[in-house]
Amino acid sequence: MTNRFSRISALRSNFLRLNQTGEISFNIHFWLVIVSTALIAVLYYSWQYWFPWFWRYFAFEYLNRILGVPFIIFPFFYACFKFGWRGSLLAWFIIILTLTPLFFQYYLLHREQIVLNIGFLTIPLAVVLAAAFELYWREEQKQRMQEREKERQDYLAKTLSIQENERQRIAQELHDDSIQELYYIASTAQNIASDINNPGETRRQAVSMNEGIIQVMQGIRNIIADLRPSILDDIGLIPALRWLIQHVFQNYTIDAGLVVNGTIRKFSPDKEMIIFRIVQEALSNVRKHANAAKVTLTLTFATDGLDIEISDDGKGFNKEEMLQDLSPEGKLGIYGMSQRAQLINGTLELKSATNKGTTVLINNIK
Ligand SMILES: Nc1ncnc2c1ncn2[C@@H]1O[C@H](COP(=O)(O)OP(=O)(O)OP(=O)(O)O)[C@@H](O)[C@H]1O
Ligand SMILES: [Mg+2]
C-alpha cells in the first residue's frame, strides 16, 4: 500500500517538476502540438466561412455524433509519442477545452451527446495512459532487476575475495603455528636421540614434546572448527546454537539467552548449517555493533516451518542509511544473511531504529 502511494506521489512530483523547470515550454515538439491543436481548432470554428471543404469531414463527425477526430489523430498521438503519459494528458485537457464551446453549440439540446463525445475522447486517453503506465512499471522493474544483479555480482566478487583471504589466513596459521611447532618437536626428538644417555634431560624433552604435540592438535582443531563446526553434526542444531551463544559472548557481559517454542524438528544438514551461519552472523553483529545488555535468540517451530528471531536492546541503526551503503567495502553480513535465508526458502526482515535495539527475523524456513 505504502509502496503504491509512494509511486503515485513520485509520478505527481515528476509531473510538477517537468512543468516547473520549463522543459516543456522550450521543446519544439510541444509547440508543434500546440500549433497543430490551434490550427485544427480554427478549422472547426471557421469552416463555414473559410474552409467549406472541411464540411465533408465535419459532416462525417456530425452524422456519427463524434467530434474531435483530427485532434486525436494528430496532436494527441503526437504528444503521447513524444512526451509519454504526461504530454498526452496535457494535450487531452487542451483538446477538451478547445472543443467545449463546439460541444455546447451543437449538442446543447442533447446533453447525452456531450457525455458520449467526452467518452469517445476518453478512450484513447485511457489506452495511452494504460500503455504508458505499463511501460513505466516495466522500466522500474528492469531497473530493480539490474540493481539486484549488480548486488549479486558485487556479493560474488566479495565472497571470492573473502574466500581467498581465508585460504591465505589458514595457510599462514598452519605455517606460523603448526609447522613451527612441528619443527620444534622434530628437533627435540633429534636431541633425545643424540642424548639418550641423559635420562633427566630426555624426560624433560619428552614432556616438552608432548606439550608441543597437544598445542599443534589444538591449533588444528581450531582451524577445523572455524572451517566447519562439527558441533552441528555431533550434537544437533539447538545445542549447537546454545554453544554458539556462549562462544560468541564468552568474554562479554551480556545477558544472552535461547528460547525454543513448538516441537523441535530436524532439517537437512545443509539447511542446519545455513541456519547456524545466519545466527552466527546476527550474533556477531550484536557483539560488534550493538553494545547491548540483552540478546535473545528465539526459535519457533511450526508444522510448516521455522521462524528465527535474534533480538537485542542495543543502540540499533538507521536502516535506510545503512542499506544505502551496504554494497561498498566490507559490510557483507546482512546481505549474506538475506542470501542465505533465500537458500532455505525463508525471508529476512530487519527491524531497527537508533537507540531502539535491533531485531533480525527469518520467517518461514522450510
Ligand atoms: N545488532 C546490531 N546493532 C547495531 N547495529 C547493527 C547491528 N547489526 C548490524 N548493524 C549495523 O549494520 C551494518 C551492516 O552490518 P553487516 O553485518 O552487513 O556489516 P558489518 O558487520 O559491518 O561487516 P561484516 O559483517 O561484513 O564483517 C553494521 O556496520 C552496523 O552499523
Ligand atoms: Mg556483520
Image: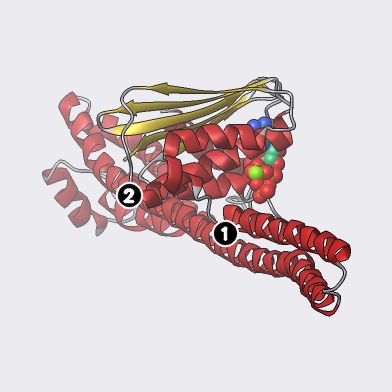
Tell me the number on the disc at residue 128.
Answer: 2
Residue sitting at 66 percent across and 59 percent down?
217
Q: Considering the image in quadrants, where does the N terminus appear?
A: top left
Measuring 65% from the left and 25% from the top, which residue is drawn there? 353
- Give the spatial CA distance, label 2 vs label 1: 40 Å
Residue type, mark 1 in image: Tyr
* Mark toward the start of the polypeptide (2 vs 1): 2
Image position, residue 7 (x, y; %): 47, 37
User: The residue tagged with tag 1: helix, strand or loop?
Assistant: helix
Residue 273 shown left or right of residue 188 in the figure: left
| Residue 304 falls left or right of residue 191 | left
Q: Residue furthest left?
A: 63
Q: Residue at x 40, y 36 (%)?
A: 97
Disc 2 residue type? Val
Q: Where does the C terminus fall, quadrant-wise?
A: top left
Q: Which residue is mark 1?
A: 155
Give the vertical position of 206 relative to 233 (above or below). below
Give the residue displayed 15% in from the left and 41% down from the top: 65
Q: Residues within 10 Å of mark 2 (few under 14, many from 20)?
A: many
Comparing 122 with 205, the one in front is 205
